[in-house]
Image (cartoon, helix red, strand yellow):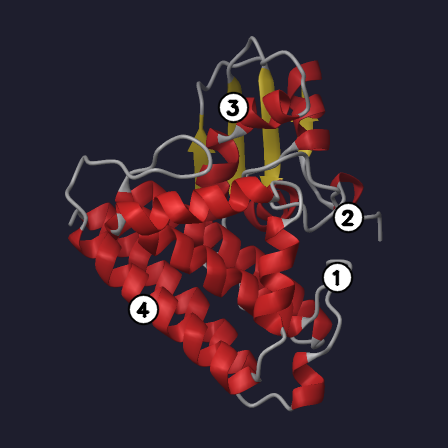
Amino acid sequence: MTDTLQQVLADLTAVGNRLESLVVDLSEEGWRTPTPAPGWDVATQVAHLAWTDEAALAAASDQEAWDALVLTALEDPDGFVDRTALEGGAVAPDALLARWREARTTLTGALQDHPTGEKMPWFGPPMSATSMATARYMETWAHSLDVHAALDAEPVVDDGIRNVAHLGVRTRRFSFATHGLDAPTEEVRVELTAPSGDLWVWGPEDASQSVRGSAYDFCLLVTQRVHRDDTDLVGQGREANEWLTIAQCFAGPPGEGRERA
C-alpha cells in the first residue's frame, strides 16, 4: 500500500465516522428527515453510500459479484440509483447502519490489499485502489453534506477535501463530455485556498485559463452542492468560466445542480 493510498483511506474513514456519529442516535423520525436531494431522506442517503461501497467492494475483490451487479444495473439504467437507495433506506435504521458500517469497513481492507498498479472495473474508466478510495471519499463527503443540511448540523471542514478538489480538477474534460460539449483546448491553472490556509495548485503557472478561490467552494461546486453564483470562485477565460457552470466530478449523466440561494 502506498503512502498516498494510506492517507486517502484515513481521510475516507474519518469522513465516514463523522457521518455515522451524526446519525447513530437519530430517532426513526430523524432518519426520515428530507434532505436537499428531492425524494431522498437521511436513510436514503446512507443507503446509497452502503450500496456504492458494496459495489466498490465487488469491483475490488469479486469479479462474479461485479458482473452480476452490472447486469442488474443495465436492466434499469435510468432508475437503478434511486431504486437501490430508496429500497435500502426503507429498512430499520439499525440494520441500515450495520450494513453501511460493514460495507465501508470491508471496502477499506480490500483497497489496502489491492495489488499496486492493478486497476478494477467501474461504471466509468477502470480505477486504481487510490482512485477508488478518492472517489469514495468524494461521494461520502458530498452525501454527508446533504445529511448535515437536513439535520441543521454544521459539517467539519478540513484538508481532507483535497481529495474532492483533486478529483474535481481531474474530471474537467468529463464535465464537458457529459454535456455533449467539445473538450477544452487549453490547459487551466487552478489555485485554491485550503481550509488550513495552504494554497493548492494544479496546472501550468502561465495558463491563460484559470480558476481561483476557496477550496471548499470549489468542492461544493464540483459535487453540485452549490450554485456557482453562491461561491467565491473567479474564472478567467471562456473555457474556465464554462467549466464552472457545468463542473461535475461524479459519474453518470449531467446532474441537476442546486438552485441559487
* Of marks 4 and 1, the one in the foreground: 4
* Of marks 2 and 4, the one in the foreground: 4
Which mark sits nearer the N-terminus, 3 or 2?
3
* Amino acid residing under circle 1: Pro
Which mark sits nearer the N-terminus, 1 or 2?
1
CA–CA distance in space, label 3 to label 2: 25 Å
* Amino acid residing under circle 3: Arg
Percent of width and height locating residue 175: 60, 28
Query: Which one is nearer the viewer's eye here, 147 or 118?
Result: 118
Q: What residue would you read off at disc 1?
A: 36
Q: Are marks 1 and 2 in contact (CB under 8 Å)?
A: yes
Q: Residue 258 — which label?
A: 2
CA–CA distance in space, label 2 to label 4: 31 Å
- Residue 160 visible somewhere in the drawing: no
Percent of width and height locating residue 250: 55, 41
Question: Under tag 3, what secondary structure?
Answer: strand
Q: What residue would you read off at disc 3?
A: 189
